[in-house]
Image (cartoon, rainbow, N blue to C red):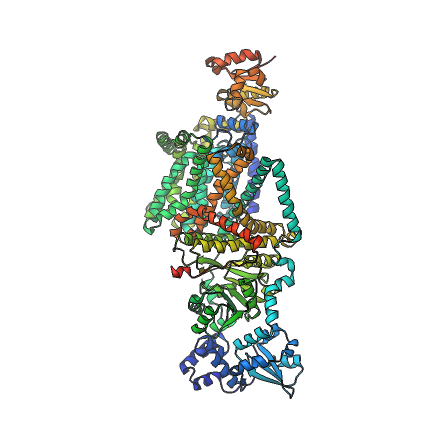
């Protein structure tokens, strides 16, 4: 029986480049369309504002207090913090293009090729995740790479693949710290697979070394630059198991009810291959449960996985799984299964976006139709535009941080992280031209009253914020 | 050689009549001759059934010629030197015959170690304008002895200065060119003046430059590793193709083995050569011995190697280096291909065939194929383990990476298989360069030749003693420095010849390696100072960007260095070495020590060859 394998990119890079470029334009367009309606990607606003302010003040990563932000995540937003989906669109476009090349390679009927390719590229879940969930896209990308290379290594025993798998696995720590705990699963997997060889320790050193390096180097940086190793390390490795389990449970429950085509697929695979004991000892099983693992780990870090992300990850893993299941399933049936699976997913995806999804997913669908509006984000944007003329602004970014995701001026923002903050608080009008304050914060912060009087003039007031300036 | 002359009784029969061999042994040799080709006398001799001197005696009887070897001392003294004005050393070696005297009757007496060839006689008749030739048979060793006597000065001069005469700027005879002296002087003075007036800014700038070099080196090595790993994926074992090569197709292969004070390893060496999956009668093994090294010479004589072995005594002259010996050996090589092994090497038996196949399957641009090196005594101690890790990474990832990216490959010390005519064309080895192999790889690239990689390993002895290791490594690093200086004498010309990509690769790989090891201790010093005392001047020297860069290089560079070595061990299935790879940073300290020793020697003893003591593993 023929084993369908991933296509080599060496001879197909032109095709890949063409599809990637087209998809990049498409996703960029959608992203801009959504942002023009104030629908912004699902990223922690506080994180983005910190990056924006660091850039504004030319503060490098080491000088900022960013050790609670994973390095890779930080730099994925660093280039364009006002457009947080930029990096994930590039990664997403590449991955989807690769999947399309795979389809073109493995399916011979032109109609089937077209339908499947368009499904993967334009499925609402794919577009939603790529344009709105940058962190999850990055995680899914590296997680899938880890699994893919692990499978290749398992099959070919080429060290190169183990190397790539280990690096991709380790890099995930720099996207979400909780991924460190997945190492335990890897230890279990290698323990089961290589116990009899007596080489378990060597395998574990090899696969876990990059992860350990990334973790230890992070500790080292915290120790050198912050000193409070215990606090940050506790924060980084805090594992909210209850939330993780809850997320997992909810995910499983919602799959059974609202995403039954995926569960059908899982059931089918399990029935086909679950009877082979070796399946559970191979990385195939790891891939099989990967979407649930991701949901669990994201949950332990306090992040809820959207239904869309689960679907996309399932499809990606399906693509990874099928070449290896080829000998078990036979080629013809394989194609039929993929065909049925994708058809279900696509139809169901469009349908479910209309009724079954979360608020954010529903908003996304409105945004696609140009019907979305968000007055809160609009307020941030307007306040930010009013700050532009000032060369120095005093503010407490603990409350006003969302404004700085839209700030396009070059002024100095004097906030709690600034060197001059305490001095500026003592003599505000000498250091700053304006004072930005959150109305709610003003009510509880005694300094706010004093500062507003010092500046005196209400330059601009929105529903939530006030800008004071000197007359 | 073709065109064999009429002959008398068959050689095999003569041997049986003289009681030198049994009929069974003759049948065995005839079988080999039928299957693999070759001349029966040489087959019998290479199988060790008859002694060399008996072979030539039988040959003389077979061709009814005088056997002159018993009278060799007299011949050596009475040979007519005038005759050598008409024939070159290379011609003598090509025809394996040398003119002795002209008789009163106008006949030329030719001493021949490969008798029975019409073409040889015709050549001598034409060259010396004589009608008759009188052939006397001498052994091939006698012939070599005569050539060494007659052409002694020329041989010595060519083996030392051959490359220098060919192209002075390609030789490391002069360490620095005038322009380089001016350049380094200007750089030193400029830096000194700048440090005097702006000490912190200048040092900060120098640190920034050093960090950029690190960054480029890390990126470059990572890229090489990725490419070297791809080689692992695309490579397909060619054992079937190897087995399909008929022995009759295989050419004569010269094996050069330079030895110095290594009497203990001769027997092992003979056994290793016997194990080659290559017709023994097509092997031309040359043992290169230094004249003052009597003990090895005696050991080699006692071992009685087969007749396809020759000893070449290298006359004493300075520099006394391995490349000089190799050049000397190259003059006497009879093979179409040539390989170098060290005395303690244990090559995989199929290596010569793999090299031949590689040459056959690739175009004429290939001058050399490098085999992988690894160590047989890896478990001896911590140093040998770390050394094995380094070599596994170097030969299994770095060199294949260079090959995959079509970049200049610095050859390893042994197991480099050459096409002899091309090797001669580019001038052989540089005796003044202490890593003549690396230099040769770069020169080959500069001459538009390519170096390839073959998947066959030679097992060597890893240096198990720290001081001995530092001596060896300092020699290698000094050679890298010499090579960098040699090929930077005319940088613009080199860029034009090599192209920018190869030129940059050369700078990073050959020039960058010693530079990084020299810089390492300085930066480690700064790092420790920063962690412990964190003086203010360091904060001023390290701008935020330089600090970030330094930390990245420190963390990621060390990680990659360790991890790559670890993978090398994994690929070789040397699993016991995997945990040892974590100790690599301590090994790099030794590199730095060796690099400073090398720098000192480059300035004060540039051509001094730090001899590595071999055989220590056996002693342990």
Instruction: Name the residue at the bottom extreme.
Output: B105
Residue A158 location (% of width, % of height): 44, 51
A265 sits to left or right of A44: left
A223 sits to left or right of A428: left
A63 sits to left or right of A410: left
Residue B404 at least partly seen = no
Residue shown at 54% from the left, 43% from the top: B215
Q: Nearer the viewer, residue A446 or B523?
A: B523
Residue B484 location (% of width, % of height): 59, 52
Residue B491 location (% of width, % of height): 65, 51
- Figure quadrant of residue A406: top right
Q: Nearer the viewer, residue B451 or B507?
A: B507
Check the image and report above or below for B547 versus B595.
above
Check the image and report above or below for A241 versus B467.
above
Residue A56 at least partly seen = yes
Check the image and report above or below for A45 versus A182.
above
């Amino acid at each position: 029986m023929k084993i369908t394998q991933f296509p080599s990119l060496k001879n197909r890079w032109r095709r890949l480049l063409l599809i990637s470029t087209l998809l990049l334009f498409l996703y960029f367009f959608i992203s801009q369309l959504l942002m023009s309606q104030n629908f912004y990607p699902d990223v922690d606003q506080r994180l983005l504002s910190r990056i924006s302010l660091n850039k504004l003040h030319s503060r490098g990563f080491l000088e900022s207090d960013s050790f609670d932000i994973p390095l890779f995540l930080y730099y994925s937003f660093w280039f364009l913090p006002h457009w947080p989906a930029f990096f994930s669109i590039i990664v997403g476009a590449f991955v989807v293009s690769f999947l399309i090349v795979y389809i073109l390679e493995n399916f011979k009927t032109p109609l089937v090729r077209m339908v499947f390719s368009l499904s993967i590229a334009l499925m609402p879940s794919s577009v939603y995740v790529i344009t709105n969930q940058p962190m999850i896209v990055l995680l899914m990308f590296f997680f899938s790479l880890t699994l893919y290379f692990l499978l290749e290594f398992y099959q070919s025993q080429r060290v190169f693949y183990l190397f790539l798998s280990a690096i991709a696995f380790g890099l995930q720590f720099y996207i979400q710290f909780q991924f460190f705990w997945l190492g335990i699963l890897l230890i279990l997997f290698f323990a089961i697979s290589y116990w009899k060889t007596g080489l378990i320790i060597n395998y574990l050193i090899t696969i876990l070394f990059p992860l350990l390096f990334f973790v230890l180097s992070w500790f080292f940086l915290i120790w050198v630059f912050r000193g409070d190793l215990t606090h940050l390390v506790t924060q980084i490795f805090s594992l909210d198991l209850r939330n993780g389990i809850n997320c997992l449970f909810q995910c499983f429950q919602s799959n059974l009810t609202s995403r039954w085509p995926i569960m059908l697929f899982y059931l089918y695979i399990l029935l086909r291959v679950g009877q082979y004991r070796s399946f559970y000892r191979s990385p195939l099983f790891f891939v099989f449960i990967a979407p649930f693992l991701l949901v669990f780990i994201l949950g332990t870090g306090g992040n809820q996985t959207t239904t869309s992300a689960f679907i996309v990850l399932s499809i990606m893993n399906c693509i990874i799984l099928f070449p290896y299941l080829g000998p078990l399933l036979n080629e013809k049936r394989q194609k039929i299964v993929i065909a049925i699976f994708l058809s279900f997913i696509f139809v169901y995806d469009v349908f479910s976006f209309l009724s079954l999804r979360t608020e954010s997913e529903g908003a996304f669908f409105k945004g696609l139709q140009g019907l979305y509006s968000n007055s809160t984000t609009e307020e941030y944007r307007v306040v930010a535009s009013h700050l532009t003329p000032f060369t120095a602004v005093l503010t407490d970014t603990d409350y006003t941080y969302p404004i700085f995701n839209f700030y396009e001026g070059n002024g100095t923002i004097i906030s709690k992280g600034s060197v001059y903050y305490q001095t500026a608080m003592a003599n505000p009008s000498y250091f700053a031209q304006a004072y930005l304050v959150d109305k709610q914060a003003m009510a509880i912060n005694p300094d706010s009253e004093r500062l507003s009087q010092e500046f005196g003039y209400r330059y601009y007031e929105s529903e939530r914020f006030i800008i004071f300036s000197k007359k | 050689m073709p065109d064999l002359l009429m002959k008398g009784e068959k050689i095999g029969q003569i041997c049986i009549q003289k009681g030198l061999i049994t009929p069974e042994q003759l049948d065995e040799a005839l079988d080999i001759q039928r299957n693999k080709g070759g001349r029966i006398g040489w087959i019998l001799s290479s199988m060790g059934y008859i002694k060399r001197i008996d072979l030539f005696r039988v040959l003389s009887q077979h061709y009814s010629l005088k056997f002159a070897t018993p009278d060799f001392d007299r011949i050596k003294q009475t040979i007519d030197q005038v005759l050598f004005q008409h024939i070159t050393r290379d011609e003598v070696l090509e025809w394996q015959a040398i003119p002795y005297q002209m008789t009163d009757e106008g006949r030329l007496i030719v001493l021949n170690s490969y008798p029975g060839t019409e073409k040889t006689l015709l050549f001598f008749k034409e060259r010396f304008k004589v009608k008759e030739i009188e052939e006397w048979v001498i052994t091939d060793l006698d012939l070599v002895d005569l050539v060494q006597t007659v052409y002694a000065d020329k041989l010595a001069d060519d083996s030392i200065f051959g490359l220098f005469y060919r192209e002075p700027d390609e030789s490391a005879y002069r360490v620095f060119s005038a322009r380089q002296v001016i350049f380094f002087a200007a750089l030193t003075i400029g830096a000194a003046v700048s440090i005097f007036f702006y000490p912190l800014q200048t040092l900060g700038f120098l640190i920034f430059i050093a960090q950029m070099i690190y960054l480029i080196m890390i990126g470059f090595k990572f890229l090489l590793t990725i490419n070297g790993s791809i080689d692992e994926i695309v490579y397909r074992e060619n054992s079937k193709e190897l087995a399909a090569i008929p022995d009759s197709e295989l050419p004569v292969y010269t094996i050069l083995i330079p030895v110095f004070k290594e009497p203990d390893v001769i027997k092992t060496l003979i056994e290793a050569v016997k194990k080659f999956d290559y017709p023994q009668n097509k092997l031309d093994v040359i043992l290169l011995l230094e004249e003052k090294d009597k003990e090895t010479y005696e050991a080699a004589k006692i071992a009685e190697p087969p007749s396809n072995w020759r000893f070449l005594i290298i006359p004493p002259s300075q520099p006394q280096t391995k490349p000089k010996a190799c050049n000397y050996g190259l003059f006497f090589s009879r093979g179409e291909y040539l390989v170098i092994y060290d005395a303690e090497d244990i090559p995989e038996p199929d290596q010569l065939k793999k090299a031949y196949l590689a040459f056959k399957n690739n175009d004429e641009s290939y001058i050399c194929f490098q085999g992988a090196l690894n160590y047989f005594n890896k478990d001896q101690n911590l140093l040998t383990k770390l050394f094995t890790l380094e070599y596994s990474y170097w030969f299994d990832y770095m060199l294949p990476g260079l090959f995959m990216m079509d970049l200049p490959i610095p050859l390893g010390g042994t197991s480099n298989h050459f096409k002899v005519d091309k090797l001669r064309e580019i001038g052989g080895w540089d005796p003044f360069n202490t890593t003549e192999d690396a230099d040769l790889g770069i020169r080959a690239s500069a001459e538009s030749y390519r170096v390839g990689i073959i998947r066959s390993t030679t097992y060597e002895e890893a240096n198990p003693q720290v001081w001995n290791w530092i001596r060896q490594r300092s020699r290698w690093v000094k050679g890298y420095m010499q090579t960098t200086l040699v090929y930077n004498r005319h940088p613009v010309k080199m860029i034009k010849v090599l192209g920018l990509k190869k030129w940059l690769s050369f700078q990073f790989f050959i020039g960058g390696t010693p530079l990084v090891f020299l810089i390492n201790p300085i930066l480690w010093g700064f790092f420790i100072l920063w962690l412990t005392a964190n003086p203010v001047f360091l904060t001023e020297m390290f701008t935020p960007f330089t600090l970030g860069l330094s930390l990245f290089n420190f963390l990621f560079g060390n990680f990659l260095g360790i991890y790559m070595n670890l993978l090398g061990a994994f690929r070789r299935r040397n699993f016991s070495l995997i945990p040892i790879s974590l100790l690599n940073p301590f090994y790099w300290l030794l590199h730095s020590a060796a690099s400073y020793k090398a720098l000192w020697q480059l300035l004060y003893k540039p051509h001094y060859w730090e001899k590595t003591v071999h055989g220590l593993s056996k002693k342990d």
